[in-house]
Amino acid sequence: MRAAVAGLRTQHPARIVVAVPAAAPEVCDAFRAEVDEVVCAITPEPFYGVGRWYEDFSQVTDEEVRILLEEANRQFLYR
């Protein structure tokens, strides 16, 4: 998420909003200093780990990430 925020900053957006369905309270608090708005749907304590709060938290392969980033880049460049 921090890498995404840093990448967005280079585009000089009017605002950056970080939104997540579940996060540790201290993570949401830390992001408040880095972005304009933080939306955390639930911040359970103790948090334990993000996978606990999803029915399916399957891992994504590096190849899947690469493909998704390439597609997002194409859409950004040709809009």
Image (tube, rainbow, N blue to C red):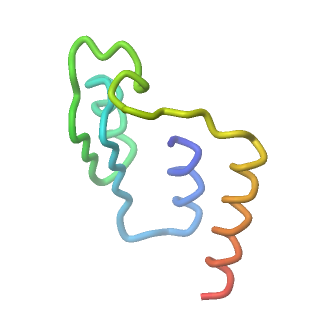
- Quarter of the figure with residue 32: top left
Camera-side residue of 76 and 58: 58
62 with respect to 14 (left or right)? right
Which residue lies at the image location 30% right of the left edge and 17% below the top edge?
47
Give the x, y percent position of residue 1: 50, 42
Which residue lies at the image location 69% right of the left edge and 69% below the top edge?
71
Camera-side residue of 11 and 77: 77
Camera-side residue of 35 and 49: 49
- Quarter of the figure with residue 79: bottom right
Which residue lies at the image location 28% right of the left edge and 31% below the top edge?
29
Give the x, y percent position of residue 72: 63, 68
- Quarter of the figure with residue 74: bottom right
Give the x, y percent position of residue 27: 35, 28
In the image, residue 46 above or below residue 31: above
Q: Residue furthest bottom?
A: 79
Give the x, y percent position of residue 39: 25, 47
In the image, residue 28 above or below residue 25: below
Which residue lies at the image location 78% right of the left edge and 47% below the top edge?
63
43 with respect to 61 (left or right)? left
Tell me how many marks there are. 0
